Image (cartoon, rainbow, N blue to C red):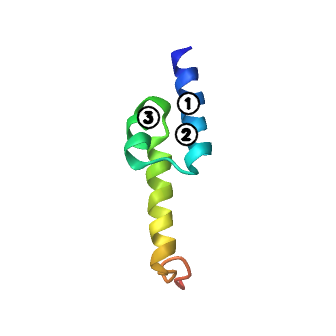
Amino acid sequence: MASKAIGVKLKALRLKNGFLQDELAESAGVSFGLFDEWKMLKQFHAWIQSNDYSRFWAEP
């Protein structure tokens, strides 16, 4: 029941702030299994912002 309450609180924070701060995601991710997904999303976002699409479009 406590984990459900925490999940609802996290969802409310996401809706309020529009994003989760790194510290919140890292502390909550261990118990909710979100840390890996959050880390992958951050890496993908950094890759998109770097405009380095050559690895994605590399020819064989």
Which residue corresponds to mark 1? 9
The furthest residue to the top = 1
Q: CA distance from mark 3 to mark 1?
A: 11 Å
Vertical position of residue 40 compared to residue 50: above or below: above
Q: Amino acid at mark 3?
A: Ala
Give the quarter of the figure containing the N terminus: top right
Vertical position of residue 2 compared to residue 18: above or below: above
Which residue corresponds to mark 2? 13
Q: Secondary structure at mark 3?
A: helix
Where residue 22 sits in the image (x, y, percent)? 40, 49
Quarter of the figure with residue 27 = top left
Question: In the image, what residue occupies the spot 44% across and 48% down?
Answer: 21
Mark 3 in CB contact with mark 2 (< 8 angstroms)? no
Does label 3 or label 2 sit earlier along the sequence? Answer: 2
Which residue corresponds to mark 3? 28
Question: In the image, what residue occupies the spot 54% across and 85% down?
Answer: 59
Where residue 55 sits in the image (x, y, percent)? 48, 78
Mark 2 in CB contact with mark 1 (< 8 angstroms)? yes
User: Nearer the observer, disc 3 or disc 1?
Assistant: 1
Circle 2: is it few (<14), some (14-19), or many (20+) Cα within 10 Å? Answer: some
Quarter of the figure with residue 29 = top left
Where residue 33 sits in the image (x, y, percent)? 48, 35
Vertical position of residue 37 compared to residue 44: above or below: above
